Amino acid sequence: MNYLNIHPEVQKALDNNQAVVALESTIISHGMPYPKNLETALMLEEEVRKNGAVPATIALINGKIKIGLTKVELTFLAKEGLKVTKTSRRDIPYVLAKKLTGATTVAATMIAADKAGIRVFATGGIGGVHRGATETFDISADLQELAKTNVAVVCAGIKAILDLELTLEYLETLGVPVLGYQTDELPAFYTRKSGFKVDYKMKNPKEIADLLKAKWNLNLEGGVIIANPIPKESALDFDVMTKAIDQAIIEQNKLGIKGKESTPFLLAKVKELTKGKSLESNIELVKNNVILAAKISVEYIKN
Ligand code: PSU
Ligand code: MN
């Protein structure tokens, strides 16, 4: 039985070796409120097109893994919001078998993109090792996925709600390259600086595409992280963000929020504490990532 349902436009692009960029849907359902989430999802697809690639937003709908969504489907996901199942690797079989609606996380989007033959994926932030993970063991399944699935993930670095240092150590163990786009410092999502280094600074999309080819031509399975700093004019103040995040984590612990609810809770709390400022930055950084992903995918399909 074929669980994949690829949108005809995406299928045509793949058949003709044209550039395609995968986009996740958890950011729509769980990452932003309606109607900003819908506007953003549509804007991101438009930016991919403007930069020479075909967008493929991914979600699980009615027993199928949909690669490329219609506007009706995007609107449905955006309106349903938190009612949609946040779907990571372990949730995929249940959501498909029960014909539920699933928004894909970074891990699940990578799996779907890989099955469709899409090699470049853009998002805002990836999951990672949570602060306090030495006690809680809360380490996102995104990291294990990056170890085994051949998809490049363009993101704005590693979000400061996580433990950046442990996340980098974990990625090193798993053999996942962390590249910095025109920077040797790891960006921290809302801010351009984190105090940590990336593995390699890359100067343009072609250099990145060449690295991807070297990795996968050698069958070195797994993904690559391309950390793209938020544009200067959209970056938030480091100290303000640090305070908001520390506060969000205190509230999370007080309420005993754990597991898959943790990341959406922290993101929503930080947004509340920054009076919505983090949402505007979030939209700008994803847009920036989608543009870079489109350029990398255009280079990647060249021989
Ligand atoms: N980081 C963000 N925004 C998000 C997420 C991460 O800045 O919306 C989402 C992504 O879909 C990511 C998921 O894959 O959260 C990670 O969740 P967890 O930590 O439960 O693995
Ligand atoms: Mn987790």
Image (cartoon, rainbow, N blue to C red):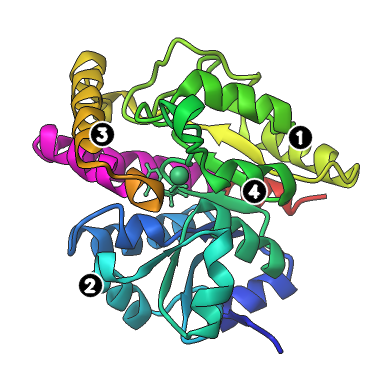
Circle on res. 79: 2
- Circle 4 — which element? helix
Tell me if mark 4 has few (under 14), some (14-19) or many (20+) residues whose alpha carbon lies within 10 angstroms of its own: many
Amino acid bearing label 1: Leu
Mark 3 crowdedness (10 Å alpha carbons): few <14, some 14-19, many ≥20: few
Q: Which mark is residue 253?
A: 3
- Give coordinates of residue 259: x percent, y percent: 40, 48
Task: Identify which residue is drawn at 56% across, 53% down.
Answer: 107
Marks 4 and 3: in contact by CB < 8 Å?
Answer: no
Amino acid type of the residue tagged 3 in the rendering:
Asn
Q: Quadrant of ligand 2?
A: top left
Labels 1, 3: front one:
3
> Marks 2 and 4, how far apart in space?
28 Å
Task: Give yes or no for residue 165 being in the magenta stretch.
Answer: no
Residue on which disc 1 sits: 211
The N terminus lies in which quarter of the figure?
bottom right
Question: Range of the magenta residues?
Answer: 264-293
**Sequence-earlier tag: 2 or 3:** 2
Label 3 to label 4, Cα distance in Å?
A: 27 Å
Q: Amino acid at mark 2?
A: Lys
* Residue nearest the viewer, comparing 91 with 58: 91
